């Protein structure tokens, strides 16, 4: 069987589950990743018996709805490669928007965290071309680095505050595969980044991803809802479980059957339970002028925003699709 013949079989077998554009993308990814060849320029390539068996098995997994990222064991997020499995969520575009917004806010040179001013320096981050595997292209990126100053600085509130020597700190609550924490650490290498999750299996993937990207993250296993934080942070960021129990029927089977429900659905009848605790904890464990970045349920935008009424600055932001999707607050 040639690749061209296999492509026709691939689309025929999976046409009921995927759109034409999705099939073309997934097909290209699998051929490039598994066979290491360009399917467009090698249409007469003859598949070996082993290759046909391997790809046939992949089709079988795709037919039952298993995400192609889990089949491959990796995905792309913010231009970088990350390992994934059944213990972690597959990152969504909205979470990329959350990270993009956080990066832009944090590297704004007018903002200071506890007197630690942020400056932008030019550096390179390895950008991952998913279909090309490790043969990724490099793209220029501005990465912030922070340093303390001996002189007094003006914060965004217009008030003066004493500079301190500590590095700015970030806490990622419900880190899963570690994508948010790792990307932020890559962009802000001088920040101290911590990340918690209730699942030790998820943290195994997160640590593997941190090692892949050569960053040092303080990962720890903790049940956030039933425990207390033990130190203060300058930034809290989170994409916690926010799908209500009553919304279960709205979620596709491929998501419910193959991704960890504990990372998707609220553990109680209250879909805002994580946000209530984050807002409460932040009042005691967020440093002055500290920032919160949250991804939220689009159906509960105003209700979520109201939880941060004691913050001097709070914003409900929309995603690229026009849905209420993020909370940004400053203590």
Image (cartoon, rainbow, N blue to C red):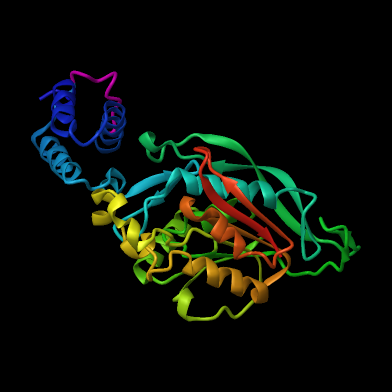
Question: x%, y% of residue 201?
Answer: 34, 67
* As drawn, 21 above or below 97: above
The quadrant the C terminus occupies is bottom right
Q: Is residue 6 left or right of residue 202?
A: left
Most distant residue in the right direction: 151
**Number of numbered callouts drawn:** 0
Q: Is residue 163 left or right of residue 128?
A: right
Within the image, what quadrant is residue 111 found in?
bottom right
Question: x%, y% of residue 240?
Answer: 46, 62
**Residue 59 visible, this orientation:** yes
Question: x%, y% of residue 68?
Answer: 27, 43
**Residue 189 visible, this orientation:** no
Q: Residue at x 41, y 66 (%)?
A: 203
* As drawn, 93 above or below 229: above
Question: x%, y% of residue 63?
Answer: 16, 41
Q: Residue at x 83, y 58 (%)?
A: 157
Q: Is residue 154 left or right of residue 81?
A: right
Q: Is residue 321 magenta?
A: no
Q: Residue at x 25, y 38 (%)?
A: 34
Foreground residue, 251 or 210?
A: 251
Main secondary-structure element of the magenta-colored stretch = loop
Write the start and end of the magenta stretch as one range. 36-44
The quadrant the N terminus occupies is top left
Foreground residue, 230 or 241?
A: 241
Q: Is residue 39 magenta?
A: yes
């Amino acid at each position: 069987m040639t690749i061209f013949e296999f492509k026709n079989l691939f689309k025929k077998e999976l046409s009921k589950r995927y759109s034409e554009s999705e099939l073309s993308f997934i097909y290209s990814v699998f051929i490039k990743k598994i066979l290491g060849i360009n399917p467009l320029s090698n249409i007469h390539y003859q598949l070996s018996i082993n290759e046909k068996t391997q790809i046939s098995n992949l089709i079988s997994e795709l037919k039952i709805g298993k995400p192609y990222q889990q089949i491959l064991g990796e995905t792309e997020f913010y231009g970088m490669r990350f390992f994934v499995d059944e213990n972690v969520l597959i990152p969504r575009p909205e979470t990329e928007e959350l990270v993009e917004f956080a990066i832009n806010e944090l590297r704004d040179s007018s903002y200071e965290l506890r007197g630690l001013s942020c400056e932008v320096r030019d550096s390179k981050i390895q950008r991952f071309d998913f279909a090309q595997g490790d043969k990724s292209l490099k793209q220029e990126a501005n990465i912030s680095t922070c340093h303390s100053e001996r002189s007094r600085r003006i914060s965004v509130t217009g008030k003066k505050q004493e500079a301190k020597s500590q590095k700015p700190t970030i806490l990622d609550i419900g880190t899963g595969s570690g994508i948010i924490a790792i990307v932020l650490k890559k962009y802000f290498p001088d920040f101290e980044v911590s990340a918690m999750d209730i699942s030790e299996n998820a943290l195994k993937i997160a640590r593997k991803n941190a090692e892949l990207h050569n960053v040092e993250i303080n990962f720890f296993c903790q049940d956030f809802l039933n425990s207390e934080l033990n130190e203060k942070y300058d930034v809290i960021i989170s994409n916690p479980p926010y799908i209500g129990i009553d919304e279960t029927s709205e979620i596709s089977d491929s998501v419910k059957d193959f991704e960890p429900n504990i990372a998707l659905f609220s553990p109680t009848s209250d879909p805002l339970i994580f946000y209530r605790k984050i807002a409460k904890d932040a009042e005691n464990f967020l440093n002055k002028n500290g920032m919160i970045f949250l991804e939220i349920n689009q159906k509960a935008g105003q209700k979520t925003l109201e939880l941060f009424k004691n913050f001097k600055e709070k914003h409900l932001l929309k995603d690229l699709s026009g849905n209420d999707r993020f909370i940004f607050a400053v203590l």
